[in-house]
Amino acid sequence: MSKKTELWPPRFPAHHNPSPPPFPANPRTSAPPAIAGALKLTQHRMPRKGKSTVRAASTAPSTGVQYWLLKTEPGEWSWSDQARAPGGTAPWDGVRNHQAMNNLRAMRPGDQCLFYHSGAGAASRRVVGVVEVARPWYEGEGKGKDEKAAAAGGAVDVRAVGEFRRHIALGEIKKAADEVEGMRDFALLRQPRLSVMPVPAKVWDWICEMGGGFVQDGEVEEDEG
């Protein structure tokens, strides 16, 4: 018998590959472009944090009506001027303060506003009545209580609702700061130069109660304080 000669190192057929199999390919880097693009869309993304929103005014839970206060000097635009306007409706314009303008922009039709007489003398600073927003913010049309300013800015239209039988003086409002919920945070006391501001709901209720209802046609107003 012939003895086979053993070869070393052993020889394997050409199709045999003794090297270990490669690691599985990364589908995101080795897949065809179309598939890789689809896989990329499935990557998990962390949700973005939403921006916090601040409510501009107190809202009546049952109606969604917001409450505001509008300041005006009676020598420029008084309650009598508002009441004499056609239908008791006129643009509220001439506002230049950025915060006050943002408050005007946040108003919606049906919102209620306290009509406040301001001025140099303490005796003139008082809430005299209520107006209602009839038209939301729009660009100025050069008419209203301040025609020159209205043409350059914007306005909302407000409609007279009624004059309080009893005007509520600023001094009286200050005295109630510790008695009425939300009064200490009321911008009328904290930001006295702001001309358009939100009114806390409890403060609104208190002022309306102190006002004693609205003056009727032909009724003489009793001005106290």
Image (cartoon, helix red, strand yellow):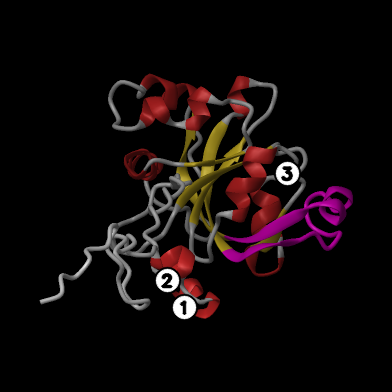
Q: Nearer the viewer, residue 176 or 222?
A: 176
Q: Residue drawn 38% across and 52% down? A: 46
Residue with the mark numbered 2: 39
State the CA–CA distance, disc 2 to disc 3. 54 Å
- Indicate the secondary structure of the residue bearing disc 1: helix
Q: Nearer the viewer, residue 48 or 10?
A: 10
Q: Nearer the viewer, residue 51 or 155?
A: 51
State the CA–CA distance, disc 3 to disc 1. 58 Å
**Three-letter code, disc 1:** Ile
The residue segment tinted magenta is: 134-159
Residue with the mark numbered 1: 35
| First in residue order: circle 3 vs circle 1 | 1
Q: Is residue 64 above or below residue 33?
A: above
**Three-letter code, disc 2:** Leu
Q: Is residue 134 above or below residue 184?
A: below
Crowd tier of the residue under label 2, counting other residues whose Cα lies within 10 Å: few below 14, some 14–19, many 20 or above: few
State the CA–CA distance, disc 1 to disc 2. 6 Å
Crowd tier of the residue under label 3, counting other residues whose Cα lies within 10 Å: few below 14, some 14–19, many 20 or above: some
- Indicate the secondary structure of the residue bearing disc 2: helix
Query: What label sits on residue 95 in the rendered view?
Result: 3
Q: Marks 2 and 1: in contact by CB < 8 Å?
A: yes
In the image, farthest residue toward the left:
1
Quarter of the image with the N terminus is bottom left
